[in-house]
Every structure is written in structure tokens, then in C-alpha cells.
Image (tube, grey):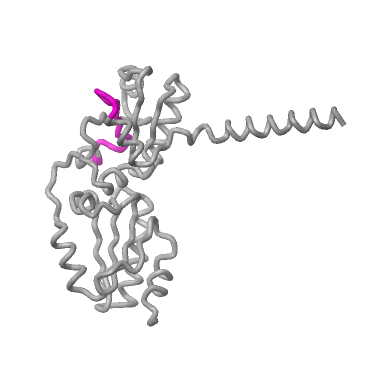
Amino acid sequence: MKNFLKNSIAMLALFITVGAFAQTPNAFTLHLDAFYAKIKSQKNPQIIDARSPEEFALNHIDGALNFYLQTENYAKYVAALDQSKPVFIYSIGAGRSGELAKELLKNGFSNVHDLEGGIAAWIGGGKPFYTNLKSKLSLEEYQKIIADNNIVLVDIGSRYCGACKKVKPVLETIRAQYGINLKIVEIDLEESPQVIADLKTVNVFPTLILYQKGKIAFKKDGLGDLNKDVDLALVPK
């Protein structure tokens, strides 16, 4: 019996250890508020934008450096970082930033934070950002579209977002199905970042919002079964 208890305790300890180890790669991911608070607590925060130079040039977090795993002279960028201080990383979602964060953790950095939702969460949460363009769509114009149309489906995303590209053919199907009875509004980060920031409701790309008579019928983080969701929301009650 004693041996059985010993073995049971040993196995339990092993499972806990393995479980903790398995979760380690995700331990650095932070929600927006925690990520922002940690950045604000640093005098000169080390912020890395892990997107492409083209994306970075259009918009980014103030003070961010721009590099990722495939960047030329990657090692030079890493060597310039202070391993004793926190590193804050983001991309569009968590793909490129997550890969970079894991690589830094493997190479001696112990305080690495990846932003959940990436630049979508940052700008969509109304945090300060740099942009070199003026938004094509203002918040006032957005609100007028919602007020002037009975049913409006809003697609918020980025042209650099893989998941966002999958939304487009679904939107065409919905447009063909509902015709003039449903207005579709597509908002890209690269064209109208300020309205995304002003809405303060976007957590990830893509975000889909269906309005009916000025009120939100549903809000979706990600594509899911959009066609079905629209059909269900618009079924006469």
C-alpha cells in the first residue's frame, strides 16, 4: 500500500510538472490592459513590431522597433536588446510575434510579453499609435451609415491578415443573397485606423458586427460561420 501511494504521488508530481512545462510557451501572452500597463511601467520600454516593414510603415505602436525572425541582420537587432529588461512583442495576431517571443525565451530572455490580438487589440482598444495616413472613414461617417441603413454588416480587418482574406468570398455570398436589403461596410486597418480606434470594440482581426435598426444584433471575433449567423440574426421574430 505504501509503495502504491508513493508511486501515485510520484506520478501526480510528474503530470503536474509535464503540464506546467507544456504551458510554458504560452505563459508570455498578455491581454491588452496588462500589456499596456507593463509598457507604461517602463521608462524606455523595449517594444518590437514583428510585422513586415510595409505594415510597420503604415501604423505601429509609438517607440516600437521593427524586426522578426526572417529579418536581415536579425542577430544584430537581438544583440541590441537588454536581456535584463522586459521585451514587448506584437504582430497582427500572435503568429509572427509568438514565434519571435519563443525564440527570445530560448536564447536567454526571461521576461518576454506577446500581445494577445496584436495590433488589432492595441488600436481597436483605443491605445495611442503612429500612422502616416488619414482615415478614409471617420467615426461620424460610420455612425451615419449605421443610422441611415436598416441592416448593416461591418467587416473590420487588415489586408495583411490571412483570416481576413477568408471573409471576402463569404461577404460576396451574403451580398448576393440579401442584395440592397443589407449594406456591407469593409474597414481596413491600412485605410481607416482611426475609426477602428474610436470604436474601441475590436479585439482581433477579423471582427464582424451586424447592426439591425441601429442596434448590434451580433459581434463576432473571427469568421466562424458568418453566413449562418447572419441568417439566424435576420430571421423574423
Report x, y in % for residue 206. 34, 54
Q: Residue at x 31, y 63 (%)?
A: 209
Q: Is residue 222 above or below residue 218?
A: above
Report x, y in % for residue 160. 30, 47
Report x, y in % for residue 99. 43, 34
Front residue (pair 144, 100): 144
Q: Residue at x 68, y 30 (%)?
A: 14
Q: Residue at x 33, y 35 (%)?
A: 50
Q: Quadrant of residue 70?
A: top left
Q: How many marks do you count on the picture?
A: 0
Q: Residue at x 29, y 54 (%)?
A: 201
Q: Is residue 1 left or right of residue 198?
A: right
Q: Is residue 203 above or below residue 112?
A: below
Q: Quadrant of the C terminus?
A: bottom left
Q: Quadrant of residue 207?
A: bottom left
- Residue 54 located within the stretch drawn in magenta: yes
Q: Quadrant of the N terminus?
A: top right
**Outermost residue to the bottom:** 236
Q: Is residue 225 above or below residue 149?
A: above
What span is colored magenta in the figure? 41-55
